[in-house]
Image (tube, grey):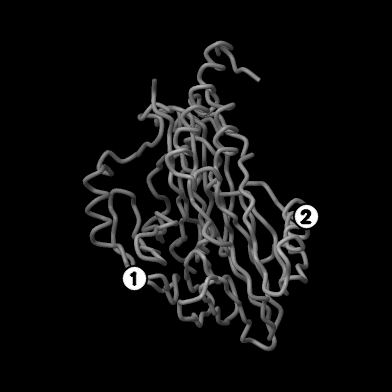
Amino acid sequence: MLMKNQNPKATAEHAERAEKGCRRRAQRSPRLLLFVAACLAFAVASLAVSAQRRVSFDGKTDYALTVEKQSSSDVKAWWSAFVEQNTLEGYCWNLNTLPLADRPRLGDKSKVLRVGGAGQLTQVVEIPPGKKTAWHGYGWEGEALFYVLSGRGQTEYRGMTGGLPSNKYTWKKNSLFAIPVDHEMQHTNLDPAQPVRLLAVTGYAINMYPFVEQELRSGRQNPAENAEERTRTLSGTTYPGHYVDDLREHPVAMREARGNRTAFFNMMSTVGHRTHPNIHISELTGPQAYAHKHGNQPMFVILKGAGYDIWSEAADLKAYEASLKAGTAHRAEYGTGTLCGVPGGPHWHQHFSTGTEPLRYLAIVPRGEYEEKE
């Protein structure tokens, strides 16, 4: 559907250029072939992105799940059906109370959420008291990031091709950890009385977009938040390693330009490989953070506190502020354990705190690749 004042010929030419660019990138890097389908879908909606309209999330990646003692054809049959029947779309979910579906072939329960990068598989997983999952993995496309919503347990992991030593994490509520690509894993619930819940974000965090003007891709309400400020923040607040014991209690440093305190994590599970490029926690220092805009479909999980998020398709800061006054911006309430995903396409959004303790959240921001202007 064309929006007002759109030229049908220009729309077709724009989509064609985006498609060609996607194919060129895929040829340069075979791994990007996984994302051609998602890229072409965004190309069809190219002018919708430029106009700051919401882009329908219809990108898809079929991860080659492997399960110990199960044939690849058998796994593909039940896994494809499970994903199709148990995928949810939306803006926010309470991960603590979200109803999950039994997944007996893995020994857990789960739901799939359509948020984050087009190449990401985002799941909520629950393991019964005292039980463990089957050994499973996602191959070279599947570096997995886990945040522990509740419970305590351990995750063992080992190389799928052999030659690498096995290892394990012992974790608790609010821990964050990553598993390297080409590894299989087994989760164990160490609590004999209570289930454990995990947020699992697996795969390459890349979103592909047709050409969008640079000034429309990102925006900052506070002029002091610029490239120099960001570089300075990253240099002083980035923590290495791929395990964080407790995100609620982890130290955070003041970032005045955003109106919060923050800490970034370099979750590099293998040398030279960084699937999840922007993982950080932020804690508001007052009732609200400065508004900002980025087009890479970030997701965030509330670690403590309560509040709400406002987002708008406004093209610039003035229009965003006008939408707040007019009450036309979208609003979503959240509390501890809520996950929200900013819609596709560059959107202004802003975090507000209404609780008795500072609002703290975990943010996972995927990469964004834009078609070059021809």
Quarter of the rendering occupied by the N terminus: top right
Q: Which residue is mark 2?
A: 81
Measured as percent of width and height from the top left, residue 324 is found at 49, 35
Whichever of callouts 1 and 2 sits on the residue coming sooner in the sequence is: 2
Residue 297's spot in the image, x, y percent?
51, 44
Q: Amino acid at mark 2?
A: Ala
- Tell me residue 101's x, y (percent): 77, 64
- Report the front residue among 143 and 280: 143
Residues at marks 1 and 2 touching, judged by CB atoms closer than 8 Å: no
Q: Which residue lies most toward the bottom here?
A: 192
Can you say which quadrant of the picture contains the C terminus? top left
Q: Nearer the viewer, residue 333 or 45?
A: 45
Q: Residue at x 38, y 72 (%)?
A: 250
Q: Compared with residue 39, is residue 191 higher up or lower down, i.e. above or below?
A: below
For residue 138, side relative to residue 101 (left or right): left
Q: Give the residue type at disc 1.
A: Pro
Q: Report the residue at 44% width, 44% height from top.
A: 29
Q: Nearer the viewer, residue 300 or 136?
A: 136
Mark linked to residue 251: 1
Q: Secondary structure at mark 1?
A: loop
How far apart are the two marked residues, 1 and 2, measured between alpha carbons?
42 Å
Q: Position of residue 98 (x, y in %)?
A: 70, 62
**Residue nearest the observer in this picture, 231 or 201:** 201
Dot 1: within a 10 Å radius of its alpha carbon, few (fewer than 14), some, or many (20 or more) residues?
Answer: few
